[in-house]
Amino acid sequence: MPYFLHCIVVHSGEAESGHYFSYIFDRQRQKWFKFDDYKVSEESEQAVFEVSRGGKDKSACCCLIYLSQDQISKMALDLENYAKAFSERLPAWVVNKVITQNKFFEMKL
């Protein structure tokens, strides 16, 4: 069963202190995104692997997360029902805020 790299967790800094952030691969868009606290940005594959292997700023990969093809297929099916399940479990104001922020993020891409 094939596995695919889904997420790279990176530590930036030194052993005594630093900061963690993640790169996550969006299979639908075939793009990498950097999740750094509240900031999300699109990143080139070259930049992802350069930073992850310790290429600059005292950053290096500390965890790799792989998904099997079965998990990826299941996630795709789950996403079809996600919006409905999401809106049924949260207060309307939260759902509306997330939808608004997602639209804003999409416009930036």
Image: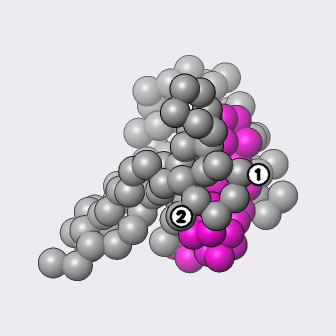
Q: Is residue 33 visible?
A: no
Residue found at x 42% / y 63%: 6
Q: In the rendering, at what x and y percent does residue 64 appear?
A: 38, 57
Q: Determine if the magenta segment contains residue 99.
A: no
| Left or right placement of residue 98 versus residue 107 in this view | left
Would you say residue 41 sits in the magenta stretch? yes
- Left or right, 64 with reference to 67: right
Q: Quadrant of the N terminus?
A: bottom left
In the rendering, at what x and y percent does residue 103 appear?
Answer: 76, 50
- Tag 1: amino acid: Phe
> Could one spot residue 47 in this view of the protein?
yes
Q: Earlier in the sequence, mark 2 or mark 1?
A: 2
In the rendered image, which quarter is residue 43 located in? bottom right
Q: Which residues are magenta?
A: 28-51
Q: Which residue is label 1 attached to?
A: 105
Marks 2 and 1 sit apart, C-alpha to C-alpha, by 28 Å
Identify the residue at image location x=68%, y=69%: 47
Which residue position holds label 2? Answer: 53
Classify mark 1: helix, strand or loop: helix
